Amino acid sequence: MFAQKWSFQKQTESFGYAFAGIRKFVVKERHAKIHLAATLVTVFASLALGVSIREGIELLFVTGLVWIAEMINSCLEKLIDFITPQHYPQLAFVKDVAAGAVLLAAFIALATGLLIFIPKIV
Protein backbone atom coordinates (compact mmCIF):
# COMPACT_ATOMS: atom_id res chain seq x y z
CA MET A 1 0.00 0.00 0.00
CA PHE A 2 2.71 2.47 1.01
CA ALA A 3 5.57 0.63 -0.68
CA GLN A 4 8.85 2.47 -0.65
CA LYS A 5 11.17 2.46 -3.59
CA TRP A 6 14.00 -0.03 -3.12
CA SER A 7 17.39 1.46 -2.46
CA PHE A 8 20.75 -0.05 -1.65
CA GLN A 9 21.17 2.39 1.24
CA LYS A 10 17.85 1.39 2.85
CA GLN A 11 18.68 -2.29 2.40
CA THR A 12 22.09 -1.76 4.00
CA GLU A 13 20.46 0.03 6.94
CA SER A 14 18.03 -2.88 7.38
CA PHE A 15 20.92 -5.35 7.56
CA GLY A 16 22.61 -3.05 10.05
CA TYR A 17 19.54 -3.14 12.31
CA ALA A 18 19.37 -6.92 12.02
CA PHE A 19 23.05 -7.38 12.95
CA ALA A 20 22.62 -4.92 15.82
CA GLY A 21 19.70 -7.03 17.06
CA ILE A 22 21.81 -10.18 17.02
CA ARG A 23 24.63 -8.37 18.84
CA LYS A 24 22.25 -7.01 21.49
CA PHE A 25 20.75 -10.46 21.95
CA VAL A 26 24.15 -12.09 22.51
CA VAL A 27 25.38 -9.32 24.82
CA LYS A 28 22.26 -8.88 26.96
CA GLU A 29 20.61 -12.29 27.17
CA ARG A 30 21.99 -14.94 29.56
CA HIS A 31 20.59 -17.82 27.51
CA ALA A 32 22.27 -16.47 24.38
CA LYS A 33 25.64 -16.95 26.07
CA ILE A 34 24.72 -20.57 26.83
CA HIS A 35 23.71 -21.11 23.19
CA LEU A 36 26.92 -19.44 22.02
CA ALA A 37 28.99 -21.81 24.18
CA ALA A 38 27.04 -24.83 22.87
CA THR A 39 27.47 -23.60 19.30
CA LEU A 40 31.23 -23.21 19.74
CA VAL A 41 31.50 -26.71 21.24
CA THR A 42 29.53 -28.04 18.28
CA VAL A 43 31.76 -26.27 15.76
CA PHE A 44 34.99 -27.43 17.40
CA ALA A 45 33.70 -31.01 17.80
CA SER A 46 32.62 -31.00 14.15
CA LEU A 47 36.09 -29.94 13.05
CA ALA A 48 37.89 -32.33 15.40
CA LEU A 49 35.75 -35.34 14.54
CA GLY A 50 35.55 -34.70 10.80
CA VAL A 51 31.82 -34.55 10.23
CA SER A 52 30.61 -34.94 6.67
CA ILE A 53 29.04 -32.11 4.68
CA ARG A 54 25.60 -33.63 5.25
CA GLU A 55 26.18 -33.95 8.99
CA GLY A 56 27.47 -30.38 9.07
CA ILE A 57 24.31 -29.17 7.35
CA GLU A 58 22.18 -31.09 9.86
CA LEU A 59 24.09 -29.56 12.79
CA LEU A 60 23.86 -26.12 11.23
CA PHE A 61 20.11 -26.51 10.80
CA VAL A 62 19.36 -27.65 14.36
CA THR A 63 21.74 -25.10 15.87
CA GLY A 64 20.04 -22.34 13.90
CA LEU A 65 16.66 -23.66 15.01
CA VAL A 66 17.67 -23.26 18.66
CA TRP A 67 18.99 -19.74 18.10
CA ILE A 68 15.86 -18.64 16.26
CA ALA A 69 13.55 -20.15 18.87
CA GLU A 70 15.47 -18.46 21.69
CA MET A 71 15.46 -15.08 19.94
CA ILE A 72 11.70 -15.23 19.35
CA ASN A 73 11.14 -16.39 22.93
CA SER A 74 13.21 -13.50 24.27
CA CYS A 75 11.29 -11.00 22.15
CA LEU A 76 7.93 -12.33 23.34
CA GLU A 77 9.02 -12.22 26.97
CA LYS A 78 10.31 -8.65 26.68
CA LEU A 79 7.17 -7.53 24.85
CA ILE A 80 4.84 -9.08 27.42
CA ASP A 81 6.85 -7.64 30.31
CA PHE A 82 6.67 -4.22 28.64
CA ILE A 83 2.93 -4.41 28.09
CA THR A 84 2.08 -5.28 31.67
CA PRO A 85 3.82 -6.23 34.89
CA GLN A 86 0.65 -8.00 36.03
CA HIS A 87 0.15 -11.74 35.73
CA TYR A 88 -2.44 -12.85 33.19
CA PRO A 89 -2.98 -16.55 32.51
CA GLN A 90 -3.19 -15.98 28.75
CA LEU A 91 0.14 -14.15 28.68
CA ALA A 92 1.72 -16.76 30.95
CA PHE A 93 0.57 -19.35 28.42
CA VAL A 94 2.33 -17.47 25.60
CA LYS A 95 5.55 -17.22 27.62
CA ASP A 96 5.43 -20.88 28.66
CA VAL A 97 4.75 -22.16 25.15
CA ALA A 98 7.54 -20.00 23.70
CA ALA A 99 9.94 -21.32 26.35
CA GLY A 100 8.74 -24.83 25.56
CA ALA A 101 9.56 -24.26 21.90
CA VAL A 102 13.13 -23.39 22.85
CA LEU A 103 13.40 -26.47 25.04
CA LEU A 104 12.03 -28.69 22.26
CA ALA A 105 14.46 -27.20 19.74
CA ALA A 106 17.33 -27.75 22.19
CA PHE A 107 16.33 -31.40 22.72
CA ILE A 108 16.17 -31.94 18.95
CA ALA A 109 19.61 -30.34 18.56
CA LEU A 110 21.03 -32.46 21.39
CA ALA A 111 19.61 -35.65 19.91
CA THR A 112 20.98 -34.76 16.48
CA GLY A 113 24.40 -34.00 17.95
CA LEU A 114 24.46 -37.27 19.89
CA LEU A 115 23.46 -39.27 16.80
CA ILE A 116 26.26 -37.65 14.81
CA PHE A 117 29.03 -37.47 17.41
CA ILE A 118 28.67 -40.71 19.42
CA PRO A 119 29.51 -43.05 16.50
CA LYS A 120 32.57 -40.91 15.72
CA ILE A 121 33.77 -41.03 19.34
CA VAL A 122 33.03 -44.73 19.91
Image (tube, rainbow, N blue to C red):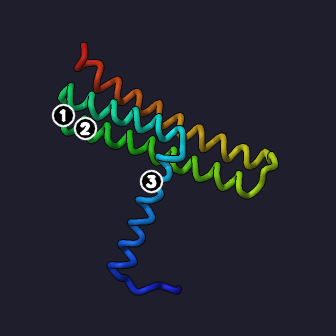
What residue do we see at 40% from left, 27% from top? Answer: 111
Total numbered badges shown on the rendered structure? 3
How far apart marks 2 and 1 lie (CA) works out to 6 Å
What residue do we see at 41% from left, 38% from top? Answer: 36
Amino acid type for the residue under numbered disc 3: Ile
Nearer the camera: disc 3 or disc 2? 3
Please give the residue where the numbered disc 3 appears in the rendered image. Answer: 22
How far apart marks 3 and 2 lie (CA) works out to 22 Å
For the residue carrying disc 2, how many other residues have a C-alpha within 10 Å: few (<14), some (14-19), or many (20+)?
some
| Contact flag, marks 2 and 1 (Cβ < 8 Å) | yes
What residue do we see at 32% from left, 79% from top? Answer: 8
What residue do we see at 70% from left, 53% from top? Answer: 80
For the residue carrying disc 3, how many other residues have a C-alpha within 10 Å: few (<14), some (14-19), or many (20+)?
few
Q: Is residue 106 left or right of residue 59?
A: right
Nearest the eye: 55 or 76: 76
Amino acid type for the residue under numbered disc 1: Ser
Q: What label does residue 56 carry, if any?
A: 2
For the residue carrying disc 1, how many other residues have a C-alpha within 10 Å: few (<14), some (14-19), or many (20+)?
few
* SS assignment at label 2: helix
Outermost residue on the front side: it is: 27
Nearer the camera: disc 3 or disc 1? 3
Where's residue 73, x and y in %? Answer: 57, 47
Please give the residue where the numbered disc 1 appears in the rendered image. Answer: 52
* SS assignment at label 3: helix
> Quick check: 109 above or below 65?
above
Where's residue 48, x and y in %? Answer: 20, 27
Q: Is residue 56 left or right of residue 20?
A: left
